[in-house]
Amino acid sequence: MNAIGIALSSENDMPRLLEMILVGAKLITRADGGTLYTVNDDNKLNFEIVRTTSLGIAMGGTSNRPVQFKAISLYHRDGRPNNERVVAYSALNKATVNLPDVYDANNSIEFDFTGPRLFDERMNYRTRSMLSVPMINHEGKTVGVIQLINKQNKATGEVLAFDRNDTHLVKSLASQAAIALTNKRLIDDLKELFDSFIKTIATGIDEKSPYTGGHCKRVPLLTLSLAEAASRDTEHLKEFKLTEQKRYALEVASWLHDCGKLITPVHVVDKATKLETIHDRIHLIDTRFEVLKRDAEIAMLRNLMKVESDSPEAEAIERRYHDEIATLNSERDFIRHCNKGSEFMAPELQERVKSISARTWCNCEGHTTPFFSEEELKNLLITYGTLNKEERQIINDHIVVTIKMLKSMKFPENMKEVPEYAGGHHERMDGTGYPLGLTREQMSVPARVMAIADVFEALTAEDRPYKEGKKLSEALAILGKMKQEHHIDPVLFDIFIHEKVYLPYAHKFMNPKLIDIEEPFEIPGYPFKMQ
């Protein structure tokens, strides 16, 4: 009993815990058979563990054989308690039932033994003694029932009735088991609540922007796949082993790695073009070009009124007008292209933007103003992407907020690394990343894993406003260049390629048209060919 009690207090696996309870009850009473039931939310008794030694029956628990018996309802359809079944009676009435012989017509309570008799006929067995003990927790609630069959004489194997000592011992075990089971369920419920909470936060981040939907759901899958592959490596990362606790901490960190984006303004997260704020201001620029074209037409018509209609001067005026319209259309199309921010903006292109900015236009109030405001010009001159320096800093700050939020959470000892795992996915191996400028040696393996997962997900995602999803070959090539530039972990990159971690992910989340390779032989920074 002491050994069983100690084991019950330390076991975390629910099927193993339930098996331990039943096997312990059989052991201390020398019962040939036994079943452990648990009460579910539908007021039914689930068959959890079934053991009959003489028949070699082992279902549930660690047996790898599921219990296929239907649950027993505690109440009939009309609401009456199901007192005809022994285990249901025991659960409903919190009563111990000890029957020396289930076939004895003189039992004090009339039970329905149709089930046991059918079992006996089918299995050529004889059910005699039966002991049913409810498992009642500290709140007085029945959480399950232990039912034992056919106590055996240790020497002769003769079936005996369960005695007072058996009842006392099983009731004591049932009490301990009820507490252990309740505690385990409480822990599982709290974990489930915590898991649903972090996934709700991740869903909120994804739903905040239609352009990042799914990011917080995809990164954990890729992160754990790469971490598992790294844990299998016995050459370069033999010191890293992904235990269950470390795996769970990494999973939580993956789900919460962008939680700081909750405070990032939507107009920055969703900025699809250089001129976008609440709306895309390119339409305002288009309007100004139309104003200049209108003014050019008015000027042409006024000048034509001063000369003969078929004179050389009239032809020159019309020619200058059409040239001006062509120039304005060309400049408008050029500014529209620059606004997309889909490619690197060379210095000569920036100079052309500046030359266009020298134009003026007459606004609706009749004032002549610069063609671009200072803020518009600053955004149009962005070299990479659509974010200006200040907006990029706002985006970068999300990781600072992430670390701050996670450090404020009271994680248990086995999850204390969550802030470090989640906070390192924008660091670079050469120390040029952010927010802390950590080097490879200063980062844990899980943090380095998440950095690769975050980059690969971003490269292949098709829901970003500022770019299209890359082909698989292009994404791997970019990762390879990042390895060469010491931005991502070189060993983890090699594992990522060699173990084809990217491939199941690609088939699950990428457009099939973008999966252009299965066996990537030529990737920058990759030291050997696939075998």
Image (cartoon, rainbow, N blue to C red):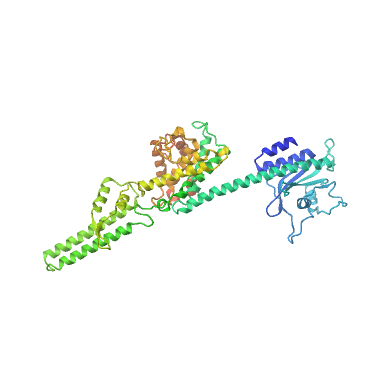
Q: Residue at x 39, y 56 (%)?
A: 278
| Above or below for 337 versus 27 | below
Estimate the x, y position of residue 202 in percent, counting from the top left. 51, 49
| Above or below for 155 versus 350 | above
User: What is the quadrant of the N terminus in the image?
Assistant: top right
Tally the marks: 0
Residue nearest the observer in this picture, 226 or 92? 92
Q: In this orientation, does residue 175 appear?
A: yes
Q: In this orientation, does residue 516 appear?
A: no
Residue nearest the observer in this picture, 108 or 503? 108
Estimate the x, y position of residue 366 in percent, counting from the top left. 25, 63
Q: Residue at x 32, y 46 (%)?
A: 383
Corner quadrant of residue 286 = bottom left
Corner quadrant of residue 517 = top left
Q: Residue at x 27, y 45 (%)?
A: 347
Estimate the x, y position of residue 329 in percent, counting from the top left. 26, 58
Estimate the x, y position of residue 456 in percent, counting from the top left. 44, 44
